Image: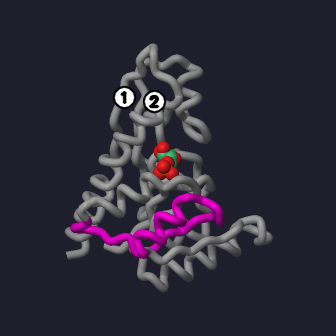
Amino acid sequence: KRIAVFASGSGSNFQSIVDENQVAYEVVLLVCDQPKAKVIERGNKADIPTCVFQPKSYVKKEVFEKEIIQQLFAYQVDFIVLAGYMRLIGPTILSAYEGKIVNIHPSLLPAFPGKDAIGQALDKNVKVTGVTVHFVDEGMDTGPIIAQEPIYVHQEDSRVTLQQKIHEIEHHLYPKVIQDLCLSSEKESV
Ligand code: GRF
């Protein structure tokens, strides 16, 4: 299956998805809404075509999403993988890729949706948090859950250590879930 990764930041998840042994999927496109993001460098190094856009220069979301769709179709993308993409997917892309968009979120959803899930978990002093991979719908981190992994929060944990633990889990969980998703959709289409 051909996948596009959408990212806005450092792109460590993008990297792990690219680096993982890719039997069932191939990353064919990177979509980024932040022209200075580190993920763009990673995309260049990995020789992956990259579509960078600046949302501010469009009058509305529908217009840039239509442009993205054109790219997705041109690269024959089957699945969209959000990896630190800091923007809600609008109806234009959602309707074209219904049930084919996944996201990773650094909490055990439905706890702590939205921005800074790690900070929210630390503020609430939870003893367990984790990582969730879910399908994307029109809400913020609300779609059906595909996989979750818990992480214990210890008293000595800081934002930095918790972030590291979350990344470690994400980097092995996300490629695996994407792989499984692609494999099961191959079976469906036989
Ligand atoms: C990850 O922790 C992910 O759960 C969240 O954004 C972060 C992206 O990190 N949605 P990176 O850019 O992949 O390093």
The magenta-colored residue range is 22-47
Q: Residue 151 — which label?
A: 1
- Separation (CA) of disc 1 from disc 2: 9 Å
Residue 96 painted magenta: no
Q: How many marks?
A: 2
Q: Residue at x 52, y 17 (%)?
A: 125
Q: Position of residue 50 (x, y in %)?
A: 52, 74
Q: Is mark 2 within 8 Å of ligand 1?
A: no
Determine whether 32 is above or below 144 in the image. below
Q: Position of residue 56 (x, y in %)?
A: 77, 65
Left or right of residue 102: residue 55: right
Q: Residue at x 33, y 71 (%)?
A: 26
Left or right of residue 68: residue 12: left
Asked if the residues shown at circle 1 and circle 2 are in contact, with their CB atoms under 8 angstroms apart, the answer is yes
Q: Residue at x 40, y 68 (%)?
A: 79
Q: Which residue is mark 2?
A: 162
